[in-house]
Amino acid sequence: MKLTRQGIENREAWEAIHVDLPRYDIDRINENTRKNPAWVHFGTGNIFRGFLAPIQQKLLNQGLAEQGIVAVKSSDFKIIDQVYTPYDNLSLLVLMEHDGQMKKEVIASISEIIRADCGDSAAWAHLRDVFVNPSLQMVSLTITEKGYGLKQIDGSLLPSVLQEIEGGPRSVRHTMSILTAMLYERFKAGGFPIALVSMDNCSKNGEKLFESVFLIAEKWEEKGFVEKEFLDYLRDENAVAFPWTMIDKITPNPAGEVQRILEELGVEAMNILETNGGSRIAPFVNAEVTEYLVVEEKFPNGRPPLEKAGVIFTDRLTVERTEKMKVGTCLNPLHTALAIFGCLLGFRSIAEEMKDPDLVELIRRIAFDEAMAVVVDPGIIRPQDFVKEVIEVRFPNPFIPDTPQRIATDTSQKIPVRYGKTLEAYLERKDLSIQSLKYIPLVFAAWCRYLMEVDDQGREMKASSDPLLSRLQQHLQGVALGDVEFDREKLRPILSSSSIFGVDLYEAGLAEKTADMFQDMIREKGGVRNTLRKILK
């Protein structure tokens, strides 16, 4: 059986292996999407294919939507050639229950995928046609935290962004520049309303998206590329809205075991491949069952009835509280702690780490002893129940083959979101002492130790990609396992960086504690484990 439009016509064969198929006319939906697009999405990875596209499929199956999603890829076009085009934009979703049961479904709600390449005149014109269509209601994004970044650690604009500011809307590569250029086309075509919806794990993600788009637009206006009225359009929430969201679903890299099972069932060409950027991709997506998407109700041109597919719509304050609960307390900081320690201690899966009593106790204490103190109950999800599910059900799921190495990607960009807000809250609250924290500083110390690219047994360990990796590692040059006379000043440029930690750890009174733990970790082989146990006593 082939995962193609022709292949799924043999419904009996797919149903025989318990794979659900779309219950709508795909050709009709694709034609509707071509004529009247409603939803565009930037970011074509697993969270999109394993969560957002299935949400839209639920609506299509119920007859509650008439269009699919237009996916947009702004870089690394290899994924289009490898897992979209050969499979007619279909994907195979495999939901992994914690007891090993698998629910399989062919997802066909991605009607087309467009290369956002200004050097490809036909693709660029097609993207413009989509954006100027009055029917377009929303543009969502899952491009990771770093996808919104326009500045270097010192606050200056990235060279590539400076180049695009000089080149104007017709010469853009960065996703934020592409999006701004397309919004300008929509503005010129009639200033039609639209919602831009970041669905990334960023604190105040809607605000972050607005700031990035507006910065580029403002620079273009200064250079005469766009009119001042375009800035007014972007600032008018009745025209262009930037709702905040909280999204939560673990969609790890494709698993070899899932590939094997699918191929044994007779599904052909389920190969796991690698993009130019090093990401692992496949025509299938394996994901956990648990999922949350909380969205601020702010859509000036209307929206699909996503609440019929489980999305929670609410006000901004509730979204912010839910996001802070998840990103700053109940999941993401725990994930990052497991990622860092998992790499150092030689683990290859998050589920295996959850069999380690030291690591389980560490994330329990981060959540319940330190971070929970500053959480505000959002009212729609109880924080204590959420984190209990994370620790007892979600992370230990052996059928979600997530790796600490994947989670450790871009840690410098994640720390200010996952820990910085907790530190800021401790500084603001008079009833709390930031100096009392010890488990969060332990994670910071372990991350600095991780930057050495040597595991706890002294073996070479390759760090995951991070935009600041080489710069951070320069500060630790000469530091080696077994150093007794460690120069603590080497850590100062790192620990003093408020752009990394959200606060200057020296000013907050946590730097010396962090440096002490780091020094303990480098004394000898096994120092990471010994320090972990020492702090947990």
Image (cartoon, helix red, strand yellow):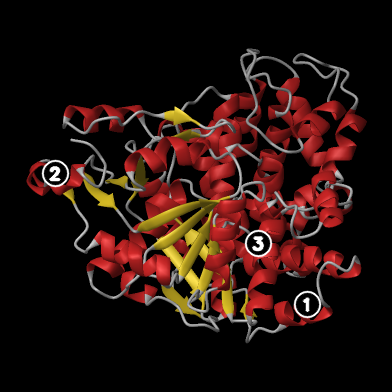
- Which residue carries the number 1 mark? 231
Query: Residue flagged by tag 1: what amino acid is it?
Result: Leu
Is residue 509 visible to us here? Answer: no
- For the N terminus, the image quarter is top left
Tag 1, which secondary structure? helix
Residue 14, which numbered label? Answer: 2
Q: Is mark 3 on a helix, strand or loop?
A: helix
Foreground of the two, 498 or 341: 498
Q: The residue under label 3 is which amino acid type? A: Leu
Counting residues from the start of the chain, the first of labels 3 and 2 encountered is: 2
From the image, tell me which residue sits under label 3.
Answer: 179
- Looking at the rendering, which quadrant does residue 241 occupy? bottom right
Q: Which of 271 and 315 is in front in this view?
A: 271
249, 165: nearer the viewer: 165
The reply to whether dot 3 and dot 2 touch (C-beta < 8 Å) is: no
Q: Position of residue 25 (x, y in %)?
A: 22, 63
* Image-quadrant location for residue 33: bottom left
Q: Which of 119 and 158 is in front in this view?
A: 119
Count residues near mark 1 (Cα–Cα under 10 Å), then give few for <14, some for 14-19, many for 20+.
some
Q: Decide: is 227 above or below 250.
A: below
> Going from the N terminus, do you reach mark 1 or mark 2 first?
2
Q: Marks 2 and 1: in contact by CB < 8 Å?
A: no
User: In percent of the image, x 31 and y 31: which residue is there?
Assistant: 270
- Dividing the image into 4 quarters, which one contains the C terminus? top right
Give coordinates of residue 458: x percent, y percent: 65, 13
Between marks 3 and 2, how big is the CA–CA gap? 39 Å
Specify the quadrant of the image occupied by residue 472.
top right
Give the residue type that dot 2 points to.
Trp
Q: How far apart are marks 1 and 2 (CA)?
A: 51 Å
The image shows residue 51 at horizontal and vertical percentages of: 39, 56
> Is the residue 519 above or below the residue 375 in the image?
above
How many numbered marks, from 0 up?
3
